[in-house]
Image: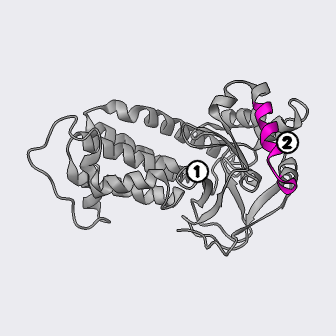
């Protein structure tokens, strides 16, 4: 679902104890594209790898190309590093968003940079290389007046690790809903996140034991749901399951799983992302996957149960 380009869904306003932030100006449905912003400038990865002095020189050159309004907008962004770095470099380190995974560089965005952090955010931010924009999609229904949030850190980190990363990188103590849980609920959340992380690392190591691998994916999806987490990890899990079925020449299950991966990718990245286009090609013909039949070919092919909402379908799909 895309936002109407004529209808702004958010406003940038002061947020108590957070400085500036972004709030919804109306109810926003899950899957809606809230922003699609071009970067003010990009710092390529090969520049960032050469150290702060090289990055600062690059920034100075880029800032000279901006008009006065753009320069003022850049200088108005938050600096969480104080005088540790030069003002230009500090603003970039505070606000820059990675472009892709692995990132081809960092982008500086005037509006997306205003979105505050939550450890279990209500939107997914993604770099869309096909349109050269940072997109923000609602990953759950957002109420009018609710703050729009993204995650500044990777998935799965437990409470103590999240707090440490955020303090070191951004100099704040997180008090989001997840970090503010009572101690017993926070411990339960940490245990779920640790298990999700272990499963994510182990899934593809199942190799030709596809029932084991599917069980891991099923368990991870259940834990993500229990955690109330919906992000790119969901479609990646379905894609991992698809790859297992592709390698075993299981056309029926592979077809169902890539369609599920596609549905979830569209929700968190929109219809025009590179991931979605790739999944669309595979959904049209799953045998295009490079690993198709890696573990051998089937003599006969199964047919999926007709009722996709039935328990019989889920039992069949996950080989339970």
Circle 1: element type: strand
| In magenta stretch: residue 56 | yes
Please state the horizontal and vertical placement of residue 151, each as a whole percent of the image.
65, 47
Identify the residue at image location x=26%, y=54%. 285
Classify residue 275 as left or right of residue 64: left
Disc 1 target residue: 126
Queried whether the magenta region covers residue 295, the answer comes back as no
Residue nearer the viewer, 161 or 258: 258
The answer to whether residue 156 is left or right of residue 39 is left
- On residue 54, the disc is none
Which numbered tag is attached to residue 79?
2
Mark 1 crowdedness (10 Å alpha carbons): few <14, some 14-19, many ≥20: many
**SS assignment at label 2:** loop
Q: Which residues are magenta?
A: 55-70
Q: Residue at x 75, y 57 (%)?
A: 111
Q: Is residue 319 visible?
A: no
Residue 297 occupies quadrant: top left
């Amino acid at each position: 679902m895309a936002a109407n380009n004529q209808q702004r869904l958010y406003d940038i306003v002061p947020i108590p104890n957070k400085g500036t932030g972004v709030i919804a100006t109306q109810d926003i449905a899950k899957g809606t594209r809230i922003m699609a912003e071009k970067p003010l400038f990009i710092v390529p990865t090969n520049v960032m790898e050469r150290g702060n002095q090289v990055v600062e020189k690059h920034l100075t050159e880029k800032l000279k190309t901006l008009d006065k309004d753009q320069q003022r907008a850049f200088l108005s962004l938050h600096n969480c590093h104080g005088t540790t770095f030069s003002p230009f470099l500090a603003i970039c380190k505070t606000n820059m968003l990675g472009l892709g995974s692995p990132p081809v560089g960092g982008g500086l965005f005037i509006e997306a940079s205003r979105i505050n952090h939550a450890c279990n955010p209500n939107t997914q931010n993604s770099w869309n290389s096909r349109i050269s924009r940072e997109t923000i999609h609602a990953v759950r229904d957002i109420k009018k007046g609710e703050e729009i949030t993204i995650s500044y850190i990777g998935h799965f980190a437990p409470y103590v690790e999240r707090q440490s990363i955020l303090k070191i990188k951004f100099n704040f103590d997180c008090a989001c809903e997840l970090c503010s849980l009572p101690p017993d609920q926070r411990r339960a959340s940490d245990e779920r996140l640790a298990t999700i992380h272990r499963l994510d690392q182990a899934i593809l190591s199942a190799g030709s034991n596809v029932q084991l691998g599917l069980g891991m994916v099923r368990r991870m999806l259940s834990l993500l749901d229990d955690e109330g987490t919906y992000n790119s990890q969901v479609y990646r899990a379905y894609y991992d399951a698809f790859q297992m079925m592709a390698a075993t020449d299981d056309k029926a299950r592979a077809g169902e799983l890539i369609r599920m991966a596609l549905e979830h990718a569209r929700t968190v990245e929109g219809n025009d992302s590179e991931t979605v286009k790739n999944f669309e090609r595979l959904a049209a013909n799953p045998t295009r996957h490079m690993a198709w039949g890696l573990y051998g070919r089937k003599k006969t092919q199964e047919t999926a149960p007709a009722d996709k909402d039935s328990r019989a379908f889920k039992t069949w799909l996950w080989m339970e």
